[in-house]
Every structure is written in structure tokens, then in C-alpha cells.
Image (cartoon, grey):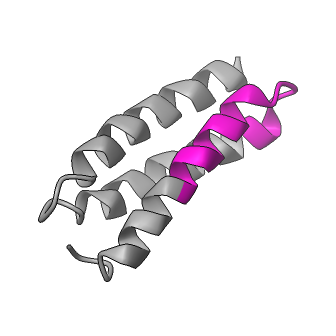
Amino acid sequence: MLNIFSWLFGLVGLVIVILGLIPFIGILNWLALPFLVIGAILGFLSSSTSGRTFCIIVLIVSVIRLFLGGGIL
């Protein structure tokens, strides 16, 4: 059950991160970080690892985008 919640938080975060990849809307990645961290925590509490892995991969993409854009752009 926790794995399903982890996937749901990861999917919400993924939608926000995809929108944040557009130039000048990169600040949305800051909004995605809490969803992805909560999803990863739920994934760690779950017995399955797929939701956790998905959230961590999307989290890494979001952090790289923030790093390349200077945190704002």
C-alpha cells in the first residue's frame, strides 16, 4: 500500500518536474522536491522498491535541473 502512495507522489512530482523543464519555469522544481522526498520516504517504508526508485530518479532529474538553472531559472 505504501508503494502505491509512493508511486502517486512520484507521478505528481514528475508532472511538476516536466513542467519545470521549460525555460523560465524552473522554479517549479522547488515545488516538486517535497512531493518526491515524501514519495521516497514512503518507498523506504514499503517492502517493494519500485516506488522508491522512481521517486529517487525523478528527484535526481529535478536537482540536476535546479543546479543547471542556478536554482531559479
Q: Is residue 42 magenta?
A: no
The C terminus, quarter of image:
bottom left
Question: Could you tell me how many numbered marks the image carries?
Answer: 0
Q: Residue shown at 50%/25% (left/top)?
A: 8
Q: Position of residue 19 (x, y in %)?
A: 23, 45
Q: Is residue 55 above or below residue 46?
A: below
Q: Residue shown at 41%/38% (left/top)?
A: 14
Q: Position of residue 4 (x, y in %)?
A: 62, 19
Q: Position of residue 51 (x, y in %)?
A: 67, 30
Q: Is residue 55 above or below residue 12?
A: below
For this orientation, the residue located farthest to the bottom is: 70
Q: Is residue 3 above or below residue 34?
A: above
**Camera-side residue of 14 and 40:** 14
Q: Give the residues drawn in magenta, as a range.
A: 43-60
Q: Is residue 44 magenta?
A: yes
For this orientation, the residue located farthest to the left is: 24
Q: Position of residue 34 (x, y in %)?
A: 46, 55
Q: Residue shown at 37%/75% (left/top)?
A: 68
Q: Residue shown at 15%/61% (left/top)?
A: 23
On screen, residue 24 versus residue 9, left or right, reads: left
**Magenta-colored segment: predominant secondary structure:** helix
For this orientation, the residue located farthest to the right is: 47
On screen, residue 8 versus residue 56, left or right, reads: left
Q: Is residue 4 above or below residue 10?
A: above
